[in-house]
Image: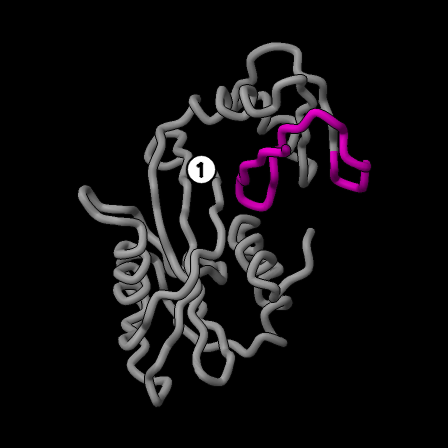
């Protein structure tokens, strides 16, 4: 089994067997403890790094333990016409998501964050879609975020009342037809594109 974590537009994978090499994909043999700095240096000019190990699960867990851990949840919302709800956050198209609060379940968090970040009402929870893991540097701390994603349905009769949560860096909330998603999401973070791959809107990278 393979394990992976995203950083911006990069993917760091852990596996027993080296993948087929392609442009932008590099492979290294496990040769001792990894550091965040070492990984970032290797992927700086590449899109993927695969660490080959006899025990990829253990290597993956050891790498994850280098970070402060947070849990989050969010949703991929569709309306009756099949359009998908996107937000534009800090210069990239994104999906609504946010941190799980103390004592809060991930499903409750996912619905709350969708409502808070988009202003939409009349959303119902669907099936669990996927889980993504990515890391980032925030206020001097390297943080690893595990996000639980759910399909959601908007049952409202009109596409009105969308209000971006500007204090979260969101400037636009829009319904997007599926045929326009590949172009808009080309500049999104890799973890977000992986949600759309799992949902069947994008081809696997």
Q: Residue furthest left?
A: 103
Q: Please tell me which residue lies in front, 164 or 108.
A: 108
Q: Quadrant of residue 70?
A: top left
Q: Please tell me which residue lies in front, 38 or 63.
A: 63
- In percent of width and height, residue 68 lies at 35, 28
Q: How many badges with numbers are in the image?
A: 1
Q: Residue at x 75, y 40 (%)?
A: 24
Q: Residue furthest bottom?
A: 157
Q: Please tell me which residue lies in front, 138 or 15.
A: 15
- In percent of width and height, residue 16 lies at 70, 25
Image height of 63 relative to 173, above or below: above
Res. 87 visible in picture: no
Q: Residue at x 67, y 41 (%)?
A: 47
Image height of 204 relative to 41, above or below: below
Res. 119 visible in picture: yes
Q: Quadrant of residue 193?
A: bottom right
The residue pinned by badge 1 equals 136
Range drawn in magenta? 1-25
- At numbered mark 1, what does the secondary structure look like: helix, strand or loop? strand
- Check disc 1: other Cα within 10 Å, few if <14, some if 14-19, many if 20+: some
Image height of 140 relative to 194, above or below: above
- In percent of width and height, residue 114 lies at 32, 64
Q: Quadrant of residue 1?
A: top right
Q: Residue at x 42, y 69 (%)?
A: 77
Colour scheme of the rendered structure: one colour
Q: Residue at x 41, y 26 (%)?
A: 67
Is 105 a magenta residue?
no
Image height of 176 relative to 183, above or below: below
- In percent of width and height, residue 113 lies at 29, 59
């Amino acid at each position: 089994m393979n394990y992976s974590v995203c950083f911006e537009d990069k993917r760091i994978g852990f596996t027993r067997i080296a993948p087929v090499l392609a442009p932008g994909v590099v492979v290294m043999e496990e040769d001792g403890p990894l550091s965040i700095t070492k990984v970032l240096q290797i992927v700086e000019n590449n899109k993927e790094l695969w660490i080959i190990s006899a025990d990829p699960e253990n290597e993956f867990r050891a790498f994850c333990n280098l970070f402060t851990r947070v849990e989050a949840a969010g949703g991929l919302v569709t309306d009756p016409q099949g359009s998908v709800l996107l937000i534009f956050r800090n210069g990239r198209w994104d999906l609504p998501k946010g941190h799980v609060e103390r004592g809060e379940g991930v499903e409750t968090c996912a619905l709350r964050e969708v409502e808070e970040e988009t202003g939409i009402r009349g959303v119902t929870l669907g099936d669990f879609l996927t889980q993504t893991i990515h890391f980032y540097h925030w206020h001097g701390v390297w943080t690893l975020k595990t996000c639980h994603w759910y399909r959601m349905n908007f049952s409202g009769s009109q596409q009105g009342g969308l209000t971006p949560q500007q204090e979260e860096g969101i400037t636009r909330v829009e319904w997007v037809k599926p045929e326009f998603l590949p172009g808009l999401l080309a500049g999104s973070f890799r973890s977000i594109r992986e949600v759309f791959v799992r949902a069947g809107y994008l081809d696997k990278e």
